[in-house]
């Protein structure tokens, strides 16, 4: 039982730590102008889609995984508001939540 829970939740914790680490970087500006913004928003969707899929794998319920992922996104935006050169953003939270939902739906709807 403990091994099964560890197997389900350890990847979630590791990926959340990766997101936290990336969020602690003071500036991610690549200097590519408007492309920089587009690439960063796509990165938000991708990193949170992975989190969403991992959360769905752990909880096995779409709404629960989406809520947990969205709540983590809130904490990430709050965290960023304390990092020099970064700021928390409602738009980024929404983009993160869309990413979570995409990851959950992609995993939950895959053929078995």
Image (spheres, rainbow, N blue to C red):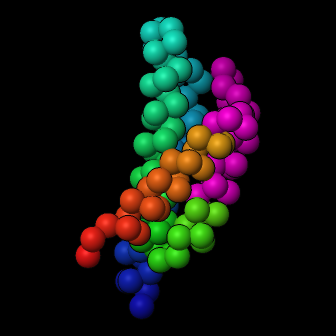
Foreground of the two, 9 or 107: 107
Residue name at image x 64 percent, y 55 percent: 70
User: Where does the N terminus fall, quadrant-wise?
Assistant: bottom left
Does any portion of residue 95 appear in the rendered image? yes
Q: Which residues are magenta?
A: 69-92
Residue name at image x 56 percent, y 48 percent: 98
Residue reaching furthest left?
112
Residue 83: give x, y in percent of width and height: 68, 30
User: Where does the C terminus fall, quadrant-wise?
Assistant: bottom left
Residue 33: give x, y in percent of width and height: 50, 8
Foreground of the two, 2 or 42: 42
Q: Is residue 56 magenta?
A: no
Residue name at image x 51 percent, y 48 percent: 99
- 88 up-or-down from 51: above or below: above
Foreground of the two, 81 or 106: 106
Residue name at image x 64 percent, y 63 percent: 67
Residue 43: give x, y in percent of width and height: 45, 35
């Amino acid at each position: 039982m403990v091994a099964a829970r560890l197997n389900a939740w350890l990847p979630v914790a590791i990926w959340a730590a990766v997101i936290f680490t990336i969020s602690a970087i003071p500036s991610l500006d690549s200097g590519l102008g408007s492309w920089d913004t587009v690439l960063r928003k796509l990165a938000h969707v991708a990193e949170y889609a992975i989190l969403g899929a991992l959360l769905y794998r752990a909880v096995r319920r779409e709404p629960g995984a989406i809520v947990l992922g969205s709540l983590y996104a809130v904490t990430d935006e709050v965290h960023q508001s304390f990092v020099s050169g970064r700021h928390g953003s409602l738009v980024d939270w929404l983009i993160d939540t869309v990413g979570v939902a995409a990851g959950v739906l992609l995993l939950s709807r895959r053929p078995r």
